[in-house]
Image: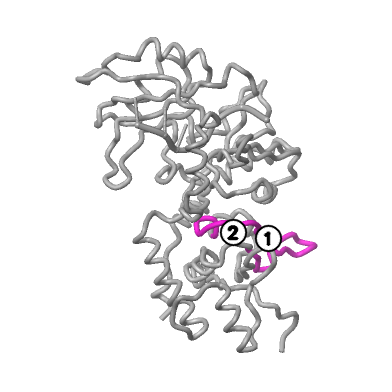
Amino acid sequence: MKSLYIQKPPFSMETQLSNGPTCNNTSNGPSTISNNCSSPVESGSMEDSKTNLIVNYLPQNMTQEELKSLFGSIGEIESCKLVRDKITGQSLGYGFVNYVDPKDAEKAINTLNGLRLQTKTIKVSYARPSSASIRDANLYVSGLPKTMTQKELEQLFSQYGRIITSRILVDQVTGVSRGVGFIRFDRRIEAEEAIKGLNGQKPPGATEPITVKFANNPSQKTSQALLSQLYQSPNRRYPGPLAQQAQRFRLDNLLNMAYGVKSRFSPMAIDGVTSLAGINIPGHAGTGWCIFVYNLAPDADESILWQMFGPFGAVTNVKVIRDFNTNKCKGFGFVTMTNYDEAAMAIASLNGYRLGDRVLQVSFKTNKTHKA
DNA sequence: TCTTATT
């Protein structure tokens, strides 16, 4: 029965847990081959801060509080800031986390870089000292040969300076290059030199010249674009209609199983039915949906909960319950998720999941305070 | 032919 509803989480437990986050850019795209996730710990020079981190590719709906919750699970945070558009207040998808202890900053890079949250794979690295020279160093490149790889693109531009990120945009359906990409240099003067040297030039073997210019600054979007962004569907976490339908299907079956009802259930409707039946509304808390996770190992930590539940949707908080004296996990923990559908999907997928040599039990938290 | 990397 249950196997019908189990969906493997979109990450490899074995790889994630034993080796730390992997360099997986399937959903985000941007990366530098040399500098993105290969060895972010080594990128800071002696003059750089060893406590201040920049976090990129955050899910659009992630708040500063959630950012703090996630990174606070590593160690004490001195300050934390999610960068937002000054006008619209929309998250720009990145933020800063400054730890008290440099060792915690290093640990955060080692354990959270590459963490998957919803459709994103976050990047955690040391922040460079802020200065005017590193601003506006992002280039927009078009007219690229469709066969050109990200590596070849970097090779072409690397003669002009240190590349921070590179990206080639691909067709969402076919995966083929759209001939358009981005190169972010460490410093603006490097970007300027690359424009001088490469704009209107033909890359080796290419038949057409490429265009290289400064990329549009996202904070300078037209009000038109801002409006259309505001009116976008708030639920773009899953790839497309098919996946949405599949998700709906599984959710309906889950609800059918859990509540003996057929379909078309919103969280409100469930509340109605379960209230009538005299059952507690499981997991429902003012701030979201609380999930109970049982059979965690003694050395389990918060990051494993983020890793497991993050891909399913908006997670606002995780907690591992520990023994006061030994500081070891007492075998269970809690996860709070904002949206009912996502919490239900996470439960359906992760309940019965084998984590190491343990089989997890995952369910909505009940309100029971003691055994009957 | 434009994603969200410097508070």
Q: Secondary structure at mark 1?
A: strand
User: Up-down: is A263 above or below A354?
Assistant: below
x 69%, y 49%: residue: A65
Q: Which of the chains bears the disc numbered 2?
A: A
Q: Which of the chains bears the disc numbered 1?
A: A
Q: Which mark is residue A305?
A: 2
Q: In the image, what residue type sits under mark 2?
A: Leu
Residue A93 lies in what quarter of the image? top right
Tell whether position A340 is magenta.
no
Q: Position of residue A330 (x, y in %)?
A: 69, 67
Which stretch appears magenta? A309-335
Q: Relative to A370, is A356 on the left or the right?
A: left
Q: Relative to A345, is A84 on the left or the right?
A: right
User: Up-down: is A329 above or below A371?
Assistant: above
Q: Reading the chain from its start, which is encountered first: label 2 or label 1? A: 2
Q: Residue furthest right?
A: A325
Q: In the image, what residue type sits under mark 1?
A: Lys
Q: What residue is disc 1 on?
A: A319
x 50%, y 49%: residue: A231
Q: Which mark is residue A123?
A: none
Q: Position of residue A146 (x, y in %)?
A: 25, 31
Taking depth in this image into account, of A3 and A269 the one nearest to the observer is A269
